[in-house]
Amino acid sequence: MTQPVRWAILGAGKFAREHMGPAIHAAHGAELVALGTSSDAKAAPFTAFAPGLRVHETYDAVLSDADVDVVYVPLPNHLHIDWAMKALKAGKHVLVEKPVGLTGPQIDPLIALRDETGLQCSEAYMIAHHPQWARVREMIADGAIGDLRHVDGIFTYNNSDLTNVRFDAKKGGGSLPDIGVYTIGSTRMATGQEPLQITHADIDDLNGVDVCARVSARFEGFSAHWITAMNVHATQSMTFLGTQGRIHVPAPFNAGTYGEARVELTQSDGAVRVERWPDVAQYKMQVEAFGASVRDGTSYAWTLEDARATQVVIDAVYAVAAPR
C-alpha cells in the first residue's frame, strides 16, 4: 500500500478550518498530521475531524516535524512568500494560498528556491482542478463558440467587518488580491492568452484597499471586463462570447457552495447544451492532484509561473488606475 502524503497546516483560520482542513482529511492518499497554532480553542475543530493530529505551538515547530511531507500555507497574504520559502528550506513541499505574492516580481525568489530544492511548490488555485473549467478550455479551443470576442467576469461579496484582514493594506488586502485572481486568472486559464493592455481601471478605495474594481483589458482578438468587490451583494459568473455562440459558467469559483457546477453552451442554431458536475469537491481534487505531483511526479495544473502571470496583470491594473 502506498504511503499517504502527510500534510500540515500553518495556522487555524476559518478557511483552513471549514474548507482545506476537511478536504485534506477526506482526500485519497492524503493524511492531515499536524497543525500550527498556539490556541487550543482554534485547534479543537481540527482535532475533532482529524483525531491524532499533532498540534504545534509555533510554525517553526511544524517545519521541524520530520513526519510532515507537505505544508499548506493559508496565512494572511503578506506572509505567504516568507513562510513558503521557510518551508521549502526545511525540506517540505508547499501549497500556498493565493495570492502567492503582493507583486509579480516578489514571487521570483520563491520560483528560484523551488527550482533549487527540486520540491513542489504551487498556488492553491482550486478552480484549475475542477472539470467544468477543463470543459470551458476545450470548448473554446474546439471552436464551439466560433472566434472568442469578449469575456465578462464578476466576483463580488459584501463584507461589512472592517477589522477583517482583507481591509488591511499592510497585509495585502483588497478585492483584486483576494478575488481578482479568479476573474483574471480564469480568463487566462480558459483562453491560454495574456492581456496585451489594461485599457481601463476604475477603483473604489478605502484606506488604501480596493473595495471595488472595474477593469477592462484587450487580448489578441477579444476584450475582457472584470468586476470584483468586497462591498457588493455576493455574485459570481463568467461568460465567454464568440462569433457563433456563448459559454456561461454560473458558479465559476465557489462551485457547489454558491451554486451548481455547470457549463451552459448556447450556439447560433439555437441549440443549448448544459453539462453539470453536482458531486465534484474541488478542494479535495486539489489536494489529491498536489499529492500525486509529490508522490508520482505528475504534472500539476497551476504553477507558480501561472500565479505570477496573474499577479502581473493585477500589478498592471493598479498602475493604470487613478492614484490610490
Image (tube, rainbow, N blue to C red):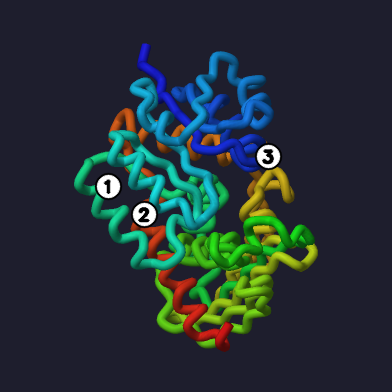
Q: Above or below — where is 304 with respect to 54?
A: below
- Examine the image and state in which quarter residue 273 appears: bottom right
- For marks 2 and 1, the one nearer the N-term is 1
Report the disc number at residue 278. 3
Q: Amino acid at mark 3?
A: Pro
Which residue is at a point 40% across and 72% down the rendered structure image?
194
- Label 2–label 1 contact, CB within 8 A: yes
Given this view, does label 2 or label 1 mark the residue nearer the observer?
1
Which residue is at a point 62% across and 63% down the rendered structure image?
168
Given this view, does label 3 or label 1 mark the residue nearer the observer?
1
Q: Amino acid at mark 1?
A: Arg
Query: Foreground: 224 or 87?
Result: 87
- Examine the image and state in which quarter residue 21 appears: top right
Disc 1 residue crowd, few under 14, some 14–19, many 20+, Cα 10 Å: many
Circle 2 is placed at which residue position?
304
Pick the quarter of the image with the N terminus: top left
Query: Foreground: 310 or 35?
Result: 35
Give the percent coordinates (x, y) of residue 321.
55, 85
Determine the CA span between mark 3 and mark 1.
36 Å
- For marks 3 and 1, the one nearer the N-term is 1
- Examine the image and state in which quarter residue 310 appears: bottom left
Given this view, does label 2 or label 3 mark the residue nearer the observer?
2
Q: Residue furthest left?
A: 116
Circle 1 is placed at which residue position?
114
Disc 3 residue crowd, few under 14, some 14–19, many 20+, Cα 10 Å: few
Give the percent coordinates (x, y) of residue 43.
62, 27
Query: Foreground: 158 or 247?
Result: 158
Residue 281 visible in rendering: no
Q: Amino acid at mark 2?
A: Leu
> Mark 1 falls on what kind of element?
helix
